[in-house]
Amino acid sequence: MSEGWQDVDSSCLSEVGYDLPTQILYLTFKKTGLSYMYPGVPQHVYEALMAAGSHGVYFTSVIKPTYPAVETWATDA
Protein backbone atom coordinates (compact mmCIF):
# COMPACT_ATOMS: atom_id res chain seq x y z
CA MET A 1 0.00 0.00 0.00
CA SER A 2 1.66 3.17 -1.13
CA GLU A 3 0.29 5.46 1.59
CA GLY A 4 0.17 2.76 4.28
CA TRP A 5 -2.21 2.61 7.21
CA GLN A 6 -2.60 5.69 9.35
CA ASP A 7 -4.39 5.96 12.66
CA VAL A 8 -6.87 8.83 12.59
CA ASP A 9 -8.39 10.97 15.33
CA SER A 10 -12.03 10.22 14.58
CA SER A 11 -15.10 8.99 16.41
CA CYS A 12 -16.04 6.99 13.29
CA LEU A 13 -12.78 5.65 11.83
CA SER A 14 -9.78 4.07 13.50
CA GLU A 15 -7.48 3.61 10.49
CA VAL A 16 -7.22 4.81 6.91
CA GLY A 17 -5.05 3.39 4.16
CA TYR A 18 -4.63 4.19 0.49
CA ASP A 19 -2.98 2.42 -2.42
CA LEU A 20 -2.19 4.95 -5.13
CA PRO A 21 -1.44 2.54 -8.02
CA THR A 22 -4.80 0.78 -7.63
CA GLN A 23 -6.72 3.78 -6.22
CA ILE A 24 -8.13 1.67 -3.40
CA LEU A 25 -9.07 3.38 -0.14
CA TYR A 26 -9.09 1.21 2.99
CA LEU A 27 -11.10 2.21 6.05
CA THR A 28 -11.45 0.53 9.45
CA PHE A 29 -14.45 1.55 11.52
CA LYS A 30 -14.18 1.98 15.29
CA LYS A 31 -17.64 0.73 16.25
CA THR A 32 -17.48 -2.60 14.40
CA GLY A 33 -13.77 -3.17 13.84
CA LEU A 34 -14.61 -4.03 10.24
CA SER A 35 -12.41 -2.89 7.38
CA TYR A 36 -13.67 -2.06 3.92
CA MET A 37 -12.05 -1.42 0.54
CA TYR A 38 -13.33 1.37 -1.68
CA PRO A 39 -12.00 0.81 -5.22
CA GLY A 40 -11.68 3.67 -7.69
CA VAL A 41 -11.12 6.46 -5.16
CA PRO A 42 -8.94 9.20 -6.68
CA GLN A 43 -5.97 10.48 -4.73
CA HIS A 44 -7.56 13.91 -4.25
CA VAL A 45 -10.54 12.30 -2.46
CA TYR A 46 -8.17 10.41 -0.13
CA GLU A 47 -6.23 13.63 0.55
CA ALA A 48 -9.47 15.53 1.24
CA LEU A 49 -10.57 12.81 3.68
CA MET A 50 -7.29 13.07 5.56
CA ALA A 51 -7.51 16.87 5.65
CA ALA A 52 -11.18 17.01 6.65
CA GLY A 53 -12.15 18.52 9.98
CA SER A 54 -14.38 15.50 10.50
CA HIS A 55 -13.39 12.22 8.85
CA GLY A 56 -16.83 10.75 9.59
CA VAL A 57 -18.74 13.63 8.00
CA TYR A 58 -16.52 13.51 4.90
CA PHE A 59 -16.94 9.74 4.65
CA THR A 60 -20.74 9.96 5.01
CA SER A 61 -21.20 12.85 2.59
CA VAL A 62 -18.62 12.07 -0.12
CA ILE A 63 -17.24 8.53 -0.01
CA LYS A 64 -20.19 6.42 1.10
CA PRO A 65 -22.68 7.66 -1.54
CA THR A 66 -20.12 7.66 -4.38
CA TYR A 67 -17.86 4.61 -4.04
CA PRO A 68 -19.14 1.05 -3.46
CA ALA A 69 -17.63 -0.74 -0.46
CA VAL A 70 -16.24 -4.24 -0.25
CA GLU A 71 -16.00 -5.72 3.28
CA THR A 72 -12.53 -7.14 3.74
CA TRP A 73 -11.82 -8.30 7.28
CA ALA A 74 -12.41 -7.68 10.97
CA THR A 75 -9.75 -6.25 13.26
CA ASP A 76 -9.45 -6.01 17.04
CA ALA A 77 -10.80 -2.47 17.22
Image (cartoon, rainbow, N blue to C red):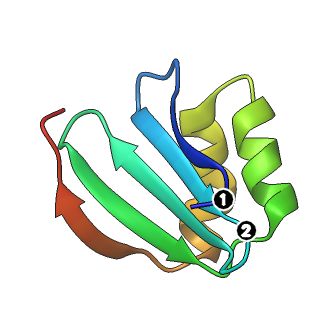
Quadrant in which the C terminus is drawn: top left
- Rendered residue at 66%/50% (across/down): 3
Tell me the kind of residue under disc 2: Leu
Nearer to the camera, 26 or 56: 26
Q: Is residue 71 above or below residue 7?
A: below
- Secondary structure under tag 1 reads loop
Q: CA distance from mark 1 to mark 2?
A: 6 Å
Pick the front one: 61 or 48 = 48
Q: How many marks?
A: 2
* Residue displayed at 71% across by 36% down: 50
Q: Picture coordinates of residue 23 (x, y %)?
A: 69, 75
Viewer-nearest residue: 35 or 18:
18
Mark 2 element type? loop
Q: What residue does disc 2 label?
A: 20
Count neighbours of disc 2 (C-alpha within 10 A) and say few if under 14, some if 14 to 19, many if 20 or more: some
Residue 76 in picture, x, y percent from top left: 12, 36
Q: Relative to residue 42, is residue 35 drawn left or right?
A: left
Where is the N terminus found, in terms of image quarters? bottom right
Q: Quadrant of residue 12?
A: top left
The image quarter in which residue 35 lies: bottom left
- CB-based contact (under 8 Å), mark 1 and mark 2: yes
User: Mark 1 belongs to which amino acid?
Assistant: Ser
Left or right of 45 in this view: 26: left
Image coordinates for residue 67, horizontal then vertical, percent: 59, 76
Query: Seen from this angle, which residue lies furthest right?
Result: 44
Q: Residue at x 26, y 70 (%)?
A: 72
Earlier residue among tags 1 and 2: 1
The extreme front residue here reads: 2
Give coordinates of residue 8: x percent, y percent: 52, 26
Q: Which residue is mark 1?
A: 2
